[in-house]
Image (cartoon, rainbow, N blue to C red):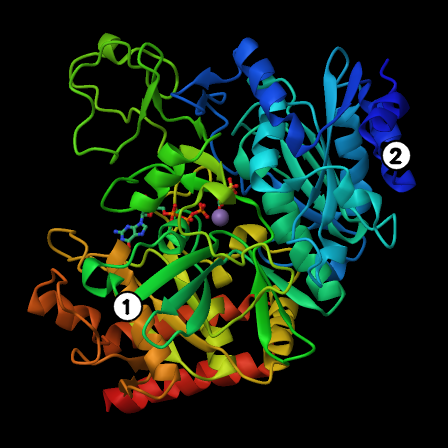
Amino acid sequence: MADPDKAMDEAGLANPSVREYVRYWAELTGADRVEVVSAADDARLIDEALAAGELEPAGEGRYYSRSYHKDTARSEERTIVATNDPKDKGVYNNWRPASEMRPLLESKMRGALVGKTMYVVPYLMAPPGNVLAPWAAGVELTDTRTVVLHMIRMARVGSEFVNDLEDPDSFVRAVHVTGELESLGHGTPDDQRYFVTVADERTILHFGSSYGGNALLGKIAHGLRQGAYDGWDSRKYLAEQYMLIGIHDKETGETYHICGGFPSASGKTNLAMMLPPDALGDRYHVSFYGDDIAWLWVDEESGRLYGMNPEYGVFGVAKDTNEITNPTALKSIDEGTGTIFTNVAYNPQTQEVWWEGRTPQPPADVTGWLDWMGSPIADREPGDDSPWAHPNSRFTTTLDNVPNIAPDYNAASGVPIDAIIFGGRTRDREPLIRAIDDLAEGVYDGLTLGAEATFAAEGVDGQLRYDPMSNRPFMAYGEGDYARHYLDVVGAAKEQPIFAHVNWFQRDPEDGHFLWPGYRENLRPLLWLIQLKKGEVTGRKTPVGIIPTKEELLLDGVEITPEDLDTILSIDVDRWRQEIGFREEHLAQFERMPEEIWEAHRRVAAALEAEAQ
Ligand code: GTP
Ligand code: SPV
Ligand code: MN
């Protein structure tokens, strides 16, 4: 049996409540050893992981890992929010009673660490000193060394983040057990995996995966689900699946901050890492604050809406990352140190990695190359064109490696928010950008975000579905209450941010090509949005928002045909009238949806009818 007190003494882990929690779980899981981790342990843990074969070298200071072949994405079906109050049940949170879930998870975890090490990972999901830091501390317990290595990259890790809490009990208890992956019945009726957030007990219990959002509990389970619940419970803040960027105008010296939600694998990391197009690079610079999570609150002193990124790293989609789509990501990997790749293709002889879209064609000489499951490419049957890398393969790197990281990303203050945008993979109907300058209509727009789901979750790729605010997989409580809370938080700000809906993914119905070139060019509609907010342009009013005229959009150097440009800057009124019917059904599912949202819906519907006359 482990001696948790000795391990905690040695590591200087002093918080008495944390110590009690660690003792409880060390005993319940039967762990042989307890090890308290801080960021300073990274090099040693990397060496141990290499020696154990959990990681392989992928060039100087870079590493490769492969997960169990059925364990490659978040499982939405197996993810549950549990509380003690049935009123917390929403449409998307898979609500279950805490009294049922806690004993079930404890039974799965009992004895699961016999013969194993229990790593103790104290973390903070906030820049130190931030006003929301009291909700940001947690301690993840895990049986998996690669999970520890990912946590060190994705969060601020060390005992100092939990030792001096004003209320020693105010940390999130986050327990992760991978279990025996081969015998968990993935996707069968007897699926043993459970990813549970007991939100009103601030306890996260995840069993049955070592992958990403299922296992890095600081990130998705705390940063989004627990954060959302705490933000509502305290009436203080919102926790959203948003990227957060600064756009700096070198001519005027001004910086604008935009945050925004796009569903998983729909372009947040790309936008946050944006290198402006050559024609605009002399004047503008885009800086990275966050690419996946933002917590938003109203700053007491200025009365403005503020935002910060609780994370410390990037867990980015590898697919289609290349010199044209995201040179910044490649630089963070090549010039930074410590990147871990998961489930890409790997060549142990040359230590190279590759993924679909990295280069137009895969390496011509397949000698040594293994696909993401570890099978030699050279052994493939002729005609086997299955992907070399898993579509949800990822790279993990810390914020310090990101070349366009904002100089003040670590500042306690956070940054004032000028605009909130929503978007997703929508193949028709949604124009390039439509701006919304009314709070209720902006929140309504977020709640009715409809897009194609992606490979970031098991079994949903390509499904068209509503994904409110891009939070569908992370909803912690009822959607009507969520809408109320959103209106209250943002509505309390003295200066309202402008809202917008963007779409980089409209396609030609015949040949399927993307109408808008996307990526670096996405800066252009965002600059227009800022100009609109400042009153420098007026746009064209439509029933669903204000859209730019061709003349207003800075288009020099953009490759797009006049027909495609017309399509992405126009509103298909009949298609939108049909959409209104779908939205009505969608919103009607939710209890306690605020009247302001229904009013916004009726205003948009009436404007569309008037336009159709
Ligand atoms: P999560 O980390 O899963 O929450 O996703 P994310 O929203 O950060 O996704 P990311 O930025 O990593 O983008 C995922 C995929 O979208 C990549 O394959 C990109 O190549 C693709 N993508 C991003 N921006 C654009 C764009 O402007 N146009 C097109 N066509 N594809 C894009
Ligand atoms: C997402 O799926 O939205 C992610 C990756 O950001 S994961 O950490 O796996 O949730
Ligand atoms: Mn995400």
- Where residue 283 is drawn, which disc sits there? 1
Image spot of residue 144 (x, y percent): 64, 23
Mark-to-mark CA distance, 2 and 1: 53 Å
For marks 2 and 1 on the same chain, the one whose residue lies earlier in the sequence = 2
Check disc 2 and report the residue beneath it: 19
The relative height of residue 293 versus residue 163 in the rendered view (above or below) is below
Image spot of residue 454 (x, y percent): 39, 45
The relative height of residue 582 versus residue 339 in the rendered view (above or below) is below
Query: CB at mark 2 closer than 8 A to ligand 2?
Result: no
10 Å neighbourhood of mark 2: few (<14), some, or many (≥20)? some
User: What residue is at 46 percent from the left and 41 percent from the top?
Assistant: 401
Image spot of residue 173 (x, y percent): 77, 41
Report the label total.
Answer: 2
10 Å neighbourhood of mark 1: few (<14), some, or many (≥20)? some
| Residue 529 in the figure: left or right of residue 229 | left
Image spot of residue 519 (x, y percent): 27, 54
For the question of whether residue 89 can be seen, the reply is no
Three-letter amino acid code at the position of disc 1: Arg
Return the residue nearer the eye: 535 or 516. 535
| Residue 437 in the figure: left or right of residue 157 | left
Q: Secondary structure at mark 1?
A: loop
Three-letter amino acid code at the position of disc 2: Arg
